Amino acid sequence: MNSNAGTFLYPEFISMAHLSEPSFVERIRASFARQNAMHLIRATLPVVEEGRTEIHLPHWEGVEQQHGFVHGGVVGMIADSAAGYAAMTRVPAEASVLTVEFKMNLMAPADGEQLIARGAVVRSGRTLIVTRAEVFAVKGGKESLCALMQQTIMVMHGKGEK
Amino acid sequence: MNSNAGTFLYPEFISMAHLSEPSFVERIRASFARQNAMHLIRATLPVVEEGRTEIHLPHWEGVEQQHGFVHGGVVGMIADSAAGYAAMTRVPAEASVLTVEFKMNLMAPADGEQLIARGAVVRSGRTLIVTRAEVFAVKGGKESLCALMQQTIMVMHGKGEK
Amino acid sequence: MNSNAGTFLYPEFISMAHLSEPSFVERIRASFARQNAMHLIRATLPVVEEGRTEIHLPHWEGVEQQHGFVHGGVVGMIADSAAGYAAMTRVPAEASVLTVEFKMNLMAPADGEQLIARGAVVRSGRTLIVTRAEVFAVKGGKESLCALMQQTIMVMHGKGEK
Amino acid sequence: MNSNAGTFLYPEFISMAHLSEPSFVERIRASFARQNAMHLIRATLPVVEEGRTEIHLPHWEGVEQQHGFVHGGVVGMIADSAAGYAAMTRVPAEASVLTVEFKMNLMAPADGEQLIARGAVVRSGRTLIVTRAEVFAVKGGKESLCALMQQTIMVMHGKGEK
C-alpha cells in the first residue's frame, strides 16, 4: 500500500528515496490522507505517478446500492478523485486543484471484489486541466470496464494545500 | 423519516393515506432503505413527489474532503440519487431505473450545516428519462446553490426492484 | 436584425438609447456579426439581455440530418452560442469568453419551422461562468423542448474582442 | 472521397469489393450522403471501419467563429457525427442510431488547415452504445488535439434508415 514501506529497514536509503521521488507524491499522499470521505468508503491511493493515479476500493457492504453492486455515486467519487490527483501531479507545490465539473457514463454494474479507478491527464494548461478516468471492476482476477469519466480541473495558483 | 409516522394514532386514516399516496412513494422509500451507501453518508430522503425528490445530508466529519467541505463525490452521490428517484416516480411498479450517465458542475464549496439535493424530471420517455438536480448548501438557514447536474436515466421494463 | 433601426429617425433619441442600453449589447452583436458559422446556418440573435440571450434558427434544407430534422450538431451550435453570449453579458468590455466544455441532451427530434435556443447564466465567478441552454422546436406556433445543455465558460481578462 | 473510385476500371473487382466490404460501410456512406448539414460545412467521411470512423473538415471561411478559428459548435458537429457513425458500425441493418447526449471539452483553438474527428466505440450494449471522439487540428502537417468528446448513442431496433 505504501511504496516507502521497506525504507525502515534501510535508513540510508530514505533520503535517496526522497531525493528521487517527485515532490508531488508526498503532497498528494498528504492530501488524500486528509480526505475523510475517501476513508469512509475505504478507498486507497496505491499509485501516484506523473500524470496518472489509481484509487482502489474494496467491495464491502457499506458502499452498496439496492442491488448489491457498488453505488454509482461511489464509483463517481473514486473516478473524480483519481483524475483530480492525476491533475495535481502537474501543478506546482504552491497551487491546489479543484474539480470544476465531471461527466461520467456508468456502462456496467460495478460488480466485483474490488474497483480500480485510473485517472490520467489529457491536457494541462496553466489554469485548466482536462482529465479522464476509467473505472474497472475486478472479479476473479479479471478487470472489466464499468465507468468512463471526463473531467475539468481548475488550478488555484498561490493556494497550496497546507 | 416516515411522514406517515402519526397514522398509528388514527387507524381509520391509514387506509385513506395509503389510498391517496401514490404507489411510487412506498417503492422508492423501500429502495432507498436498501441503499447502504446512502446510509453510510447519513443521507435521508424526506421528499418524494410526482417528478421530484429531495435528499438531505448533514455535514459531518466523515463526508469531508481535505479542506473541511463536503467531498464533491458525495455531492455527486446525493445529486445522482435525488434525480434517479425523481425518474422512478414516473415508471410503472414492474420497472426499475438505472443511471446511464450524469454531468455535474461544482460551482461553490459545499459549505454549510446541511446539503439539500433537489432532483426533478425534465423529460420522460418510455426508455430514457432526462433529469436535473441542484444541490444547495444550507448555512445559517440560508440556501446557496453549490452544484448543478444533468442526468440520463434508463428504464428497465419488466425488472422491478424486489 | 438591429433593434435600434428606427433611431435614425429620431436623432435626439439615439444618445439616450445608447445611454440606457447596456454596453454589452453592442459588443455581443458585433461579436455575433463576426461569427461566419452562425451566418452559414442562418442563425440570428434577436434577444440579448442581462444574463440571457436567444438565438433563432429557421428550419431549412441546409441544416438537416438524414431524417429531415435539424442536425443535432447544429442544435449544439446554437445552444453553445446562446449560452456563451449569455455569459458574455456578465464580463467587462476588456474581457472575452470561451467555451471550456458543454454537455447536451437531445431529447426529441428538432422538428419544426424554427428552433429557439435560450441561454442563461446559472452562476458567474471571476474566471468561470456556468450556464444552461434550452432549445425549443416551434411547430405551428407551439414550442416543445428538444434539447438541454449545461456549459462551462472561461473569462479571458484583458483579452477583449477587437 | 470515395474509396471505391477506381472500381469503374475493374468491373470484375466490384462484386468482390462488395462481398468483402462489411455491409455497414455502404449503409453509413448512404446515411452520411443524406446529411445536408455535413455538406453545408464541407465535411467528408473518409474512414469507416469496425468500431471507428474519421470525419475530415477543411478550414474555410464559412465555419469560422469571431477569432478566425473553426467554431466550437462545428467542432462538436463533426465529433458527434464521427462517434455516432462509429456506433452505427455495431448495429444490424434493420436498426438506426441516434445521439442521446454528448459532452465535449474544447481544449485548444481549432487552428489549422484541416480538422480530423476520430470517433470510436467504447462499449456497445443492445440498447445503448458509449463512444468517444477526439478532434485534431492539422497545421503544417502536424496534428494537435483540440477537443475531447464522450457520447451516449441509442439503438433504434426495427427502424433502419431507408
Image (cartoon, coloured by chain):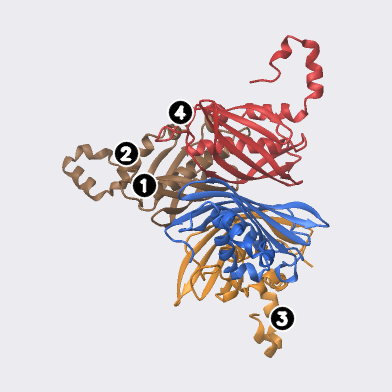
Chain colours: A red, B brown, C orange, D blue
Whole-angstrom CA distance, mark 1 to mark 2, is 11 Å
Count the marks.
Answer: 4
Q: Position of residue B44 (x, y in %)?
A: 41, 38
Q: Position of residue C10 (x, y in %)?
A: 68, 89
* Tag shown at residue C15: 3
- Chain identifier of the residue bearing label 1 in the image: B
Disc 1 residue type (three-letter)? Val
Disc 2 residue type (three-letter)? Asn
Q: Which residue position is annotated with label 4? A: A62
Q: Are marks 4 and 1 in contact (CB under 8 Å)?
A: no
Same subunit: marks 2 and 4: no
* Tag shown at residue D104: none
Disc 4 residue type (three-letter)? Gly
* Tag shown at residue B2: 2
Which circle's residue, 1 or 2, is located before the other in the chain?
A: 2
- Chain identifier of the residue bearing label 2 in the image: B
At numbered mark 1, what does the secondary structure look like: helix, strand or loop?
Answer: strand
Q: Which residue position is annotated with label 1? A: B48
